[in-house]
Image (cartoon, rainbow, N blue to C red):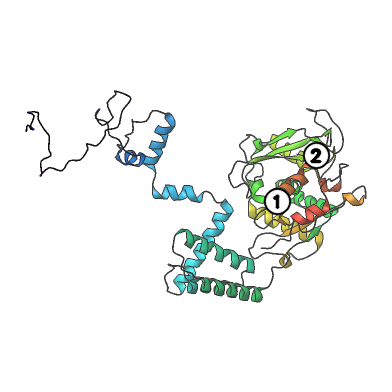
Amino acid sequence: MLDGNGHPSWRPLPCVVWSPLPSSPVRPSKRPRLGQMGLAISSPQQQFRSAPTPGPLSVSSAKARKALQVAAASSPEVIDAFVYSAFAPSTTAASRSAHKLYLSICAAQCRPHLPVSLSTLLSLVHAMTEARYSAGTVKSYLSHIKSQALRSRSLSLDPADEAILQLALRASKKILGDSPKRAVTLSRDDVHAVSVHLRAKDSTAADLYLFGVAGLFRLGELLNMSSGDVQPSWPTVEGKTTFAASVFVRKSKTDVYGHGYYRPIPCISVGGTDISAGSYPQCSSELCGAHQVLYRSRSALSPCESLFAISRDSFSRLLATAITAVKGQSCTRYTVPSPLGLGFCLTLGSASGMAYLVGFIPFLGLRYVARLGFNHQTCACRTAIATCSIAFGLGTVCLRVSLAAVVRSCRPFRR
């Protein structure tokens, strides 16, 4: 359109609404964007979901290939066994016994065992109380059943039910009472006399007895030892080199991970005497478990041979007979609910008569019923006692573990 001077003029059309064009961002680089290159842009979660499933040959490392092989061959049963291997063998055995009894009680009452409810648990507590289980066993079995049900998501209890269960446990303990102390105190002379009685019947039982007392072992730990697990050693105690038998404990209740550990058992004849490393001193004590076990291990035909070839039941019966002969008391008074063996405490005597060498260590119960070993609360106390060479008070090495610390760490044995 031309104006009056013949120049073109601009006027917006009445039907067109003008608006400025959007400004495009300035890119300093001339490189094409990822979208223009055909590459998809996504978040890490989208990349993980869209990633192809790797095949057996898509991994390069040997560990990754091994992991794929294990995953392909695994099953729910294998996974369950792997998870429950976190428990110690003794815990697994106790849990299995509790579960078996719980199933039997539910079957006797013709009621389903799942879900685990207040009524089924009260029936368990009542039945065990009437059967004269100990109060500790009733509480332990109840705890095992509740833990199993919680892991399987089949526990049906509310806070009110928990309060009623606590009342049931109190009623059970009121009826059953505290577990009696099934302990016989043995002096140093009694320890010697018991070993003499055992050696007259079975030398293996005598060696097991002395070595178990000297090292504060459990019976299960000793029965799992092989002849190759015992080696001579020359540890340093209070700046002096002494002779000892170093034993590798393969399986222990306190060793949950199953790594095993070494423990030196010093000779009680050379305690406090500085000897040269590598020498083999003569032992004159009949109570030296270290030398007795070293002789036994070197007499074996193979290092894989069992160090103590005796059954648990046989040893328990022999020990009960020997203690009865020495103490002149009936074993039935000290027998635990299971038909095995006898427990006792050990009183350490002092040859020199010094008060600080006495060693009365109260309530360090040796459970020869199902295991041999002191009922200690901390592994540190147990190791310290063995390392310091208590040796029944016969040696000259002073016991540097305070009596107060020992008493605090050890409690009366309760079943």
Confirm or deny contact between disc 1 and disc 2 (CB under 8 A): no
Q: Residues within 10 Å of mark 2 (few under 14, many from 20)?
A: many
Query: In this orientation, does residue 78 appear?
Result: yes
- Between disc 1 and disc 2, whose residue precedes? 2
Q: Is residue 10 magenta?
A: yes
The majority secondary structure of the magenta stretch comes to loop
**The magenta segment:** 9-18
- Answer with left or right where residue 324 lies relative to residue 136: right
What residue is shown with label 2? 267
Residue found at x 49% / y 60%:
148
On residue 124, which mark appears?
none
Residue 290, quarter of picture: top right
1 or 2: mark nearer the eye? 1
What residue is shown with label 1? 378
Kind of residue indicated by mark 1: Thr
In 3D space, how far apart are the residues under numbered discs 1 and 2 (Cα atoms)? 24 Å
- Answer with left or right where residue 202 lies relative to residue 161: right
Q: Is residue 229 above or below residue 138?
A: above
